[in-house]
Image (spheres, rainbow, N blue to C red):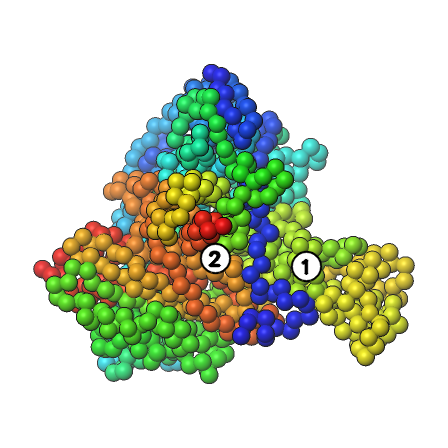
Amino acid sequence: MEVSITINGTAHSYDVEPRTLLVHYIREHAGLTGTNIGCDTSSCGACSIHLDGEAVKSCTILAAQADGGEVTTIEGMAAADGTLHPMQQAFMENHGLQCGYCTPGMVMAATSLLEENPNPTEDDVRLGLEGNLCRCTGYHNIVKSVLAAANA
Amino acid sequence: MTVTDDTTSTGNGVLGSRLLRKEDPALLTGEAVYTNDMKVPGALHLAVLRSPFAHANIVSIDTSAAAAMEGVHSVYTGADLLDTWASPMPCAWPVTDDMKNPAHYPLAVGKAKYVGDGVACVLAESDAIARDALEAIDVEYEPLKPVLGLEEALSDQTIIHDEIGTNVSYTWPLVIEESEGDCQKAFDEATHVVNERYVQQRLIPMAMEPRAVVAMPQPFGGDMTLYSATQVPHILKVMTALTLGIPEHQMRVVCPAVGGGFGSKLNVYAEELLCVALARTLNTPVRWNEERSENTQATIHGRAQIQDIELAADADGKLTAMRVRLIGDMGAYLQLVTPGVPLLGGFLYAGVYEMPKAFDFSCTSVFTNMTPTDAYRGAGRPEATYAIEHAMDALARKVGVDPLELRRRNFIPTEKYPYEAYTGLVYDSGDHDKAASVAAGLLDYDGLRAKQSQQNTPNASKRLGIGVSSYFEMCGLAPSRVLASLNYSAGGWESATVRVLPTSKVQVVTGTAPHGQGHETAWSMIAAEKFGIDPADVDVLHSDTAIAPLGLDTYGSRSLPVGGVAIGMACDKVIDKAKQIAAHQMEASPDDLEFLGGVFKVKGQPDKEMPLAGVAFEAFTAHDLPDGLEPNLEAQVTYDPPNFSWPFGTHMCAVEVDVDTGEIEVLQYVAVDDCGVQVNPLIVEGQVHGGVIQGLAQALWEEARYDEDGNLQSSTLAEYLVPAASDVPPITMGESVTPSPTNEMGVKGVGEAGTIGAAPCVMNAVVDALSGLGVDDIQMPASPLNVWNAIQAAQS
């Protein structure tokens, strides 16, 4: 079936199997591999993206469900001149990443969190990110990064 | 004091600064390429059919329906591929001469030995087709009784590997006495004896990036490139060559970005060998990516020991003897270093305490019908530290003293360093009282004890507990001679090549293989400090055996104290050569030159100087070099340290336990980790934070649970409880910097320290909260159910 999705401002249209997940559409058809896959149970959040302005785990929906939608992935976060998004910058400055595998999903979830709650407490950040797992940082510096981005 | 005060800096103060990581922009923007991100036109996709039975004879396999499916290239069984292997899969640590190591092939032949054991594989045009085709393979199994308990395995009532006739792989004793019988005598004469059994539950390392492999035959001559999400490209290269009979010089291993390892990628796996073997046979690229529920079954597990520990102490609680009996769960087969893991802990059972030569240790390791175990963050050392630190709390209760006071009575005194321990190993440095005092201050230990005595009334619904643990970490996994005495099949050295290019940019080639640790940043800082240049002008080349042919990779907190030190030494060699060229150019003696801030200066002649850039260009053109000196500025060093690296520290925490629900809240966590001189405190803190939460997760949540048939019940991230941000506390870090005298940089490792300190610290706090109710231990993980059951048992 033909599925058309605008990703990071660019229109994409591919003939895909109906069972294709949005994350596979993004990675394998659109070729944007910044969005990672870390589990098969929608538990880890590594594949978080923005669909029509909301953070979603792109492994939880079919590409067909996103037909006609607007997607932003990690590749669409920095400015065209390479300037990092304030959330990316905050993660860098606060050592909010180590191996980097959860990072794209974490950044996408965190930006969405701040859009909903621009002045979160530490507990708000911890609760707001509970759908995204990280094995390296112990979350300490991720939480610090998001709080720093909120104050930036 | 800052960490740069006591180094012999010739540079610019970069070393010891909180420099932001070079690695981050690519990782933050999605530009980083992990193995599964590689675009490989024409690659066939591998999928592996895994046994659903823990222990079963394979009666027959019918692959015809799968092979006939559209898009399927071929299907193979273990028997089909048996002739492909020059030898079984490698185990590099035959810990005893009589260790049993039954043949382990990438696909099982005749019998499946754990749920997840590969029995057949498919190559197809896409991953989806390959996985669909697995379902069309018809395997007839004859299920056998699975062996799941360690004592059941010891009984040999059901044998897993028929060819060895026993489930015991080896018994490794370590008895250290001045005279025979000293240990028993000390127990006979002891005022206090504690006798504890601890079960180190099985854990799943769960790096966020599952494993992935691409094997790519090169166009001419039979060369093969293996891309893999591994921690050990160099070990993988030689082992793949040996296992497949490929000439080693024709194998190249590359690690693209690697998304965490924690020991789980310190291995040689079936899928790596299958991809290379099939790519070689078919002369076409073959790739495989692991799904999470495969990862939990087909990638190694960690811990999995039963520990019986007995301490003997005098009236003051000073340790006089120790006896330890371990049963190690190897799982179904021996992987790369499986048998060595319990041994690494064997030397650390006395922790940071003075222990007479009255030590009786023995480890017996058995096969079970579960996923193979191997090194998981700390590998043997967290288990040992848990046992001594948890037993010290039991001893404190018996002696009737505060656990911190008991530790202070037993700490190796600072003035005795370097300290030759009862094992003969020399601990190079330590200041345990300082680490404990800093931690106690940050936690407000005395204040919390006062609060605890008020709060923990008999009817309190929420009880306060305070936990302490002090640790030593034996890391670096070198010197090579000591590894030899442990029967380890490789050395412990590390290689570095440093090259100043004609334009004075610097290349550092390292044998370490980072997967989140920030080596590109840290190694740049070491070279930048030495040369007095900007770290941005240093490029670190790694994780490709064609570019960095010599190396022993990254594990065991070894990268900085072995690999990083090698880089500093190689820089010094380059500077020595550059000095000869500069002296020649300035018509001075090399002895009269000093190198400061990237410039060679003639002492006492302020107008005579030559920057490194000028020297580099002279070395490149070679128009006017001293007689006999080779052109270019490059030096290689292979460094084999004279001793292990000995980080130490104290962790403390406060927890509140809800007596009615068994729920635990960690209120405060303090970590004082002394890893010697810090190259980049930002990175050090990150390593400790992550390590602490992994240790805390063992204490409170994580467990690879099997049912009575040997099915892994926690096989997804929905069931295996990796904590989220909302589950864990912030971590307060305290400072203690005791430079290592073992290497010229004064550095130690830090990758595993947090994990080693954390599990006993948290469990000590939980038991401390409940000891007033008669609870003397709780099995990890201290889930609400385990806690509630322990309270009910104590009160009935």
Numbered circles on residues, count = 2
On the rendered image, what quadrant is the C terminus of chain B found in? bottom left
Identify the subunit bearing mark 2. Answer: B
Residue occupied by mark 2: B686
Residue B462 badge:
none
Q: Residue B301, image x and y in percent? A: 39, 48
Determine the secondary structure under disc 1: loop
Whether residue B172 is visible, yes or no, is no
Residue at coordinates 87% horizontally, 67% vertically from top-left?
B585
Residue at coordinates 52% horizontally, 20% vertically from top-left?
A14
Q: Nearer the viewer, residue B204 or B458?
A: B458
Crowding at mark 2 (Cα within 10 Å: few <14, some 14-19, many 20+): many
Q: Nearer the viewer, mark 1 or mark 2?
A: 1
- Compared across the picture, whether B465 is left or right of A147 comes to left
- Compared across the picture, whether B748 is left or right of B351 comes to right
Q: Reply above or below: B362 against B288.
A: below
Decide which of tag 1 and tag 2 comes sooner along the chain.
1
* Residue ranking furthest to the left: B796
Amino acid type shown at disc 2: Gly
Q: Reply above or below: B157 against B748.
A: above
Whether residue B418 is visible, yes or no, is yes
Q: Nearer the viewer, residue A147 or B172?
A: A147
Residue at coordinates 50% horizontally, 54% vertically from top-left?
A94
Q: Toward which corner of the image does residue B294 lie, by quadrant?
A: top left
Q: Nearer the viewer, residue B611 or B185?
A: B611
Amino acid type shown at disc 1: Asp
Q: Reply above or below: B69 against B740.
A: above
Q: Reply above or below: B613 against A7.
A: below
C-alpha distance separating marks 1 and 2? 23 Å
Residue B534 badge:
1
Q: Residue A62, image x and y in percent? A: 41, 25
Q: Residue B77, image x and y in percent? A: 45, 30
